[in-house]
Amino acid sequence: VAQGRLDPDLIEPLAVEAKARLRRLGYSDQHVRGVATHLIRMNFKRADLGENVKDVSFTAGGAHSSFLDGEGSSITILFNQVPIKGVPLRAKSGRIEAVRVELPDERMSSGTNTLEVAFDLTVRSEDCTRVWFDQAWATLSADSYFEVRRSEAIRADDLNFKQFPDPF
């Protein structure tokens, strides 16, 4: 504060959180089928998530067939072709617990970005005769979402100190 005026450079930005579900971005549930590695690719622009975007995370959820090999089957999330996190799919649960990843800001392009979800589906060797390979499946839910912290600058003109220090 200089001579009763606020220096706008000293005002910290306010972080606001928002969620953008895949459904809102135009994607439906994504299904893959068969023993193999499957890649689901989604393209988005930074602006699709809002203005002044920073600190973006992605949380994936969904389901899978319950007879998958829990040690060989996994879900891996890649951002702009770089693997960020991989977790095994638990064999009997049939559910993909929320897999959350932070998307590195330095890898975020102002143009098109690519988020890929790789499903590596395998079945136990003892189930090979009982289960057809094409019966293995997994689904990425359209309710998976990006979580965004936006930096919104507070303008000095918006602040009112008329009743300071007694606001009530």
Image (cartoon, rainbow, N blue to C red):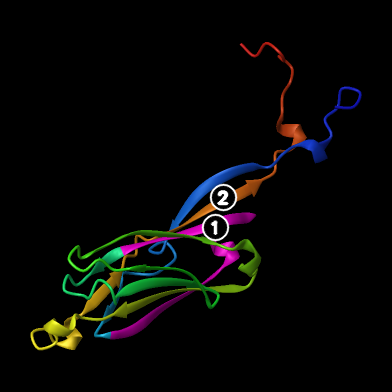
Q: Pick out the residue farthest to the right.
A: 3
Picture quadrant of residue 25 = bottom left
Point 38% across, 70% down: residue: 27
Q: Which mark is residue 168?
A: none
Magenta residue span: 36-61
Looking at the rendered image, the quarter that the N terminus falls into is top right
Residue at the disc numbered 1: 56
Query: Residue 144 placed where, x, y %?
Result: 37, 61
Front residue of 124/66: it is 124
Q: Is residue 37 magenta?
A: yes
Q: Amino acid at mark 1?
A: Val
Query: Going from the N terminus, do you reach mark 1 or mark 2 first?
Result: 1
Contact, mark 1 vs mark 2 (Cβ under 8 Å): yes
Residue 82 vs 151, above or below: the answer is: below
Q: Secondary structure at mark 1?
A: strand
Secondary structure, mark 2, is strand
Where residue 149 is drawn, which disc sits there?
2
